[in-house]
Image: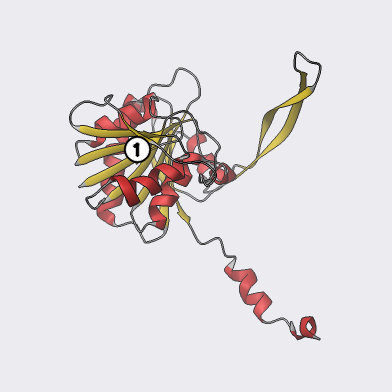
Amino acid sequence: MRILVSNDDGINAAGIYQLAKALTKLGKVTVVSPESERSASGHSITMHKPLRSNRIDLYGNDIDAWSINGTPSDCVKFALDVLLKKEIDLVVSGINRGSNMGTDVLYSGTVSAAIEGAMHGKPSIALSLCCYENCDFELAAELAVDICKKLYDAGIEKEIVMNVNIPHIPRKLINGVKITRLGVRKYKNCFEERKDPRGKSYYWLAGELDETETNGDTDINAVKGNYISITPIKIDLTSTETLEKMKNENWDLIMK
């Protein structure tokens, strides 16, 4: 199996290093990652400056690695279209420092890298560890090998991304795996005003988390219950229910 690994925490992040090393158990691993952290970059791509790739000697002789001066989506797109001459079987993004649950997936560079893989017709998985400080990625990387193998062997449908969130707790405390839907996460945004040395205002964005839907079969609830959450995400954002309803409405008046 040939596996492309990317992330949004950057080429030097501990999460991607542990993941890439662990995934060599499944096949040939290639890493293509942003040269610096690009968290919360969403699915942005670089159009107004040239992209540059640099070969990185960081992962040992068994893993080829490049850094890109772009976004996570750039990395996967550039890897599949330019860098890699052989067919990739699986795209894995992560392991992210911090969860990517609920509506956070719309902001996540980690999830967007996996979505880019799915847009290229590749089975794609996003992995996140629910931890922000003093994170130990070793167990998450070990679990990621089994999770990726099972998902790949079972077959990931076209244009579906498997979004995985792993609790940051000892193995013996993990209660298992739950297949979930996205919960709802919102932030009470707070722009803190500061002054530069010349007295001009600038603003620093912070946000207080407000988890408005945490019950039932959501990813948020699963992780709170010490379960690994796996959520299948569709690329097609069309609301099919609304589509059918609107088809039954009379739109002829628009043309009158």
* Secondary structure category for the residue under label 1: strand
Q: Position of residue 31 (x, y in %)?
A: 31, 36
> Is residue 130 shown above or below 195?
below
Nearer-the-camera pick, 151 or 206: 206
Res 215 seen here: no
Query: Residue at the spot x=60%, y=65% of the render?
Result: 239
Query: Residue at the spot x=51%, y=51% of the render?
Result: 181
Nearer-the-camera pick, 174 or 134: 134
> Is residue 176 shown above or below 116?
above
Res 78 seen here: yes
* Image label count: 1
Residue 240 sits in quarter: bottom right
* Colouring scheme applied when the structure was drawn: secondary structure
Q: Position of residue 61 (x, y in %)?
A: 18, 28
Residue under label 1, please give it: 32
Left/right of residue 133 with respect to residue 57 in the rendered view: right
Residue 169 sits in quarter: top left
Mark 1 surroundings within 10 Å by alpha-carbon count, few (fewer than 14), some (14 through 19), many (20 or more)? many
Q: Which quadrant: the C terminus?
A: bottom right
Query: Residue at the spot x=68%, y=82% of the render?
Result: 248
Nearer-the-camera pick, 2 or 149: 2
Q: Position of residue 131 (x, y in %)?
A: 48, 26
Q: Amino acid at mark 1?
A: Val
Q: Position of residue 151 (x, y in %)?
A: 31, 50
Query: Residue at the spot x=45%, y=17% of the render?
Result: 134
Left/right of residue 59 with respect to residue 161 in the rendered view: left
